[in-house]
Amino acid sequence: MAPINDVDVERMEVAVPETAHQISSDSWFQVGFVLTTGINSAYVLGYSGTIMVPLGWIAGVVGLIAATAISLYANTLIAKLHEFGGKRHIRYRDLAGFVYGRKAYSLTWGLQYVNLFMINVGYIILAGQALKAVYVLFSDEHVMKLPYFIAIAGVVCALFAISIPHLSALRIWLGFSTVFSLIYIIVAFVLSLKDGVNTSADYSIPGSSTSKIFTTIGAAANLVFAFNTGMLPEIQATVRQPVVKNMLKALYFQFTVGVLPMYAVTFIGYWAYGSSTSTYLLNSVNGPIWVKAIANISAFLQTVIALHIFASPMYEYLDTRYGITGSALNVKNLSFRIGVRGGYLAITTLVSAMLPFLGDFMSLTGAVSTFPLTFILANHMYLVAKKTKLTSLHKLWHWFNVCFFSCMSLAAAVAALRLIAVDSKNYNLFADL
């Protein structure tokens, strides 16, 4: 019998609990729509300002295309490891724990929690901005400030979270999400096109030489943030067998058909307004008030649905930990969701209202969690899992990716923290941006 090393012992010690949520119940097409919902969420309304403005036309276009290809590659690596070792790994931390051991299990869970929490902070900021944009359209008094709308958005998100017990239960809501996405993307595209035809934009990259360095690095973090969820195994857990083949279909759908609306609205927004593009594109467009109102309401509603997707790993952990199974309308289960999910979203909403710097949070999320989870960890886990089957050239390629994205992560974290520090000096807590 072959000797068991320390890593093998650690693998055996990592318990993989059952889940209180449904698994293996969704088609690849439904999972593809879940992924596409994330990539075409209301965050796309910010990419003209947070990616294209700091990078300009050449770097911005090349960067988006390169980020698409690199992200697809990294996500396929993770998808192919879903049944590594003869068992399904339905959570990112389960996969990392099986490959590396207990410490990696805890570290991955921590990174993923930070990643999803910051994404959800951004979603609530977006939802608040959308509500405020509707208010400004119909009121000249401006008595209501952004933090008030963020609070309203948090309450609505909590009500939705309490009503939808798990990720697979979204079903029809994914259809609504697609409709909402198409509304605000089409409106933003058409109104930007109209404005761009009638005006000439300035495409010079704003800022001093020093600030341009930091904003460029921050924009690179935004590039990877745009395409990656940081929770691929959790989404893959919902897909039917064969899970790897079906997940790859969903990923190909996401990174081909799914990215087209995002490309369209990002490029047209920058073309129309250049370096003056807002970090929330609907604030830049001109057009009929009722059209802009519908677009903003659609952005708000889609954000509520998208947030639920990115909060679902936390909900799944808590539901499984405390045995919340059975009917969603059971008094115990309903009370638990009200208390726990309501409390989680109350904290998220408070942070969103205190620091409503959307672009900065996108950069920080990309730096401290998206880079490590999607690129560094994916390449290294694949290297460890398939080490006996990889050629020397393949091993060198994966090590290059690990080292390159580690450096990018460090640089992007410094740049994002600097941006947050600068904005915090310029604005008070609970700023009305």
Image (cartoon, rainbow, N blue to C red):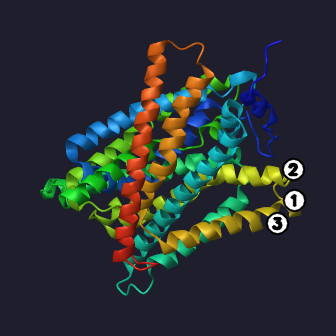
The residue identified by callout 1 is 330
For marks 3 and 2 on the same chain, the one whose residue lies earlier in the sequence: 2
Residue 280: percent from left, percent from top: 36, 61
The amino acid type of the residue labelled 3 equals Ser
Q: Nearer the viewer, residue 84 or 399?
A: 399
Compared to residue 305, the image places residue 336 above or below, namely below
The amino acid type of the residue labelled 1 equals Asn
Compared to residue 256, the image places residue 126 above or below, namely below
Q: Quadrant of the N terminus?
A: top right
Callout 3 crowding tier (Cα within 10 Å): few <14, some 14–19, many ≥20? few
189 relative to 109 in the view: left or right? left
Q: Residue furthest left?
A: 200
From this viewpoint, is residue 238 visible?
no
Q: Quadrant of residue 29?
A: top right
Q: Residue at x 43, y 38 (%)?
A: 405
Image disc number at residue 326 = 2
Compared to residue 4, the image places residue 305 above or below, namely below
Q: Separation of disc 3 and disc 2 at Cα? A: 13 Å
Q: Quadrant of residue 204?
A: bottom left
Circles 2, 1 touching at the beta carbon (< 8 Å): yes
Q: Secondary structure at mark 2?
A: loop
Q: Separation of disc 2 and disc 1 at Cα? A: 7 Å
Residue 6: percent from left, percent from top: 74, 29
The amino acid type of the residue labelled 2 equals Gly
